[in-house]
Amino acid sequence: MRPLTAPQADDVRQALLTAERRSGLRFGLFLGEPEDGRRHFAERLHAALGEEADDAVVVLVDLNGRGLEIVTGQNARRRLSDGACRMVAMSMATAFGAGDLVGGLLHGIAALGEQATAPR
């Protein structure tokens, strides 16, 4: 997949900010090739958030390896279940598989923000 254009990157940044405002959680996105395996790299990115990590969600999209990881912090996990993350990841993967990187990102980020605000 090709990298984002400037307007696409702006749309994704806006989606991240909207999800943060809606949910009160911190959202981060990594697009690229992870080092040392996707899951391990995503967990390291999440841990690098320090004190914010408990309230954070990190989405990693491996553009070359065609993979996706969603890591949630301890407090975020209370509001965003593993099952909800799996469903969002499947939806994103479907869009990515159809060649719609931006649509998959926008829908996925919005869905995560929405799920995190829904009463459980």
Image (tube, grey):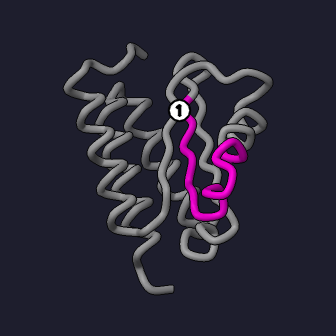
- Would you place residue 84 above or below residue 93 in this image? below
In this view, the residue in front, 94 or 15, is: 15
In this view, the residue farthest toward the bottom is 120
Q: Position of residue 64 (x, y in %)?
A: 56, 16
Q: Position of residue 112 (x, y in %)?
A: 44, 59
The residue drawn where x is 66% and y is 46% is: 46
Q: How many marks?
A: 1
- Would you place residue 53 above or below residue 34 in this image? below
For the N terminus, the quadrant is top left
Residue 42, quarter of picture: top right
Q: Position of residue 88 (x, y in %)?
A: 47, 55
In this view, the residue farthest toward the front is 51
How many residues crowd mark 1 within 10 Å: few (<14), some (14–19), many (20+)?
some
The residue drawn where x is 67% and y is 57% is: 51
The residue drawn where x is 61% and y is 19% is: 33
Q: Determine which residue is flagged by label 1.
A: 30
In this view, the residue in front, 57 or 63, is: 57
| 76 displayed left or right of 25 | right
Q: Is residue 113 magenta?
A: no
Q: Position of residue 44 (x, y in %)?
A: 74, 39
The residue drawn where x is 58% and y is 64% is: 55
Secondary element under disc 1, as helix, strand or loop, is: strand
Residue 67, quarter of picture: top right
| 101 displayed left or right of 58 | left
Q: For the residue marked with disc 1, what is the amino acid?
A: Phe
Q: State which region is magenta.
A: 46-61
In this view, the residue in front, 116 or 13, is: 13
Q: Is residue 49 magenta?
A: yes
